[in-house]
Image (cartoon, coloured by chain):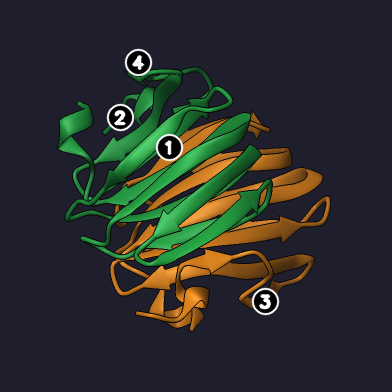
Chain colours: A orange, B green
Amino acid sequence: MSDQQQFFFTAPHITQNAGPDTTRTILGHDPTLMMLKMDFEKGAIGEIHHHLHTQATYVLSGIFEFTIGDKKRVVRQGDACFMPADIPHGCVCLEAGTLLDVFTPEREDFL
Amino acid sequence: MSDQQQFFFTAPHITQNAGPDTTRTILGHDPTLMMLKMDFEKGAIGEIHHHLHTQATYVLSGIFEFTIGDKKRVVRQGDACFMPADIPHGCVCLEAGTLLDVFTPEREDFL
């Protein structure tokens, strides 16, 4: 763990095309935790899905309609969402922006 | 888990005085994951400490000098830091700002 790049991420670490009009940038991770940014174009959709990982999302910019379980809410910069493990969730991007997503454990499927 | 407040956090959930010139606002948590904001006044210090929780930090605003293990780096908006479990870390706020901190498991000591 002596590599500075394991501690500080000032540039994109891993950038991935995450689907139509979405880009994923992994900022840091180890087996227990992953932090990444998701850039969305207006109209991009994060389809309803679920996973064993607990997820928290912070809205860095843009406007999104989130669905979590049977709840729906429009969220904007400074809002946060919390998704317990296995709960169905998804979003629609109403105005282009960026979400900060964190997961525990890490999303091995993103590596 | 049917309470909407468990999923969406558009207002401070729990705000705490976290020390001289620092304020903590818990945004969301369950036993596996906690997301919070830390507001720092210029000159505020997060003393070097360590904990069993893995931590990732995203700089929402301001300028901070972070120490993680034997590494030191100045970080600004859009930068991220990753702190493996038990690694000593701390920061000094060079320009007032806000950090988004996430922990796994949750910080029971903050509840």
**Amino acid found under the numbered disc labelled 3:** Thr
Q: For numbered disc 2, what is the local secondary structure?
A: loop
B36 shown above or below B88: above
**Label 3 vs 1, first from the N-terminus:** 3
Q: For numbered disc 1, what is the local secondary structure?
A: loop
Closer to the camera, B70 or A99? Answer: B70
A65 shown above or below A18: above
Q: Say if mark 3 contacts mark 1, CB within 8 Å.
A: no
Report which quarter residue B36 is drawn in.
top left
- CA gap, disc 4 and disc 1: 34 Å
Callout in the foreground (3, 4): 4
- CA gap, disc 3 and disc 1: 31 Å
Whether residue A65 sits left or right of residue B29 in the image: it is: right
Read off the residue under disc 4.
Answer: B17
Chain designation of label 1? A
Q: Residue at point 43% right, 20% down?
A: B23
Read off the residue under disc 1.
Answer: A70
- CA gap, disc 2 and disc 4: 30 Å
Read off the residue under disc 3.
Answer: A15
Using a 10 Å C-alpha cutoff, classify the residue at mark 4 as few (fewer than 14 neighbours), some (14 to 19) or many (20 or more).
few
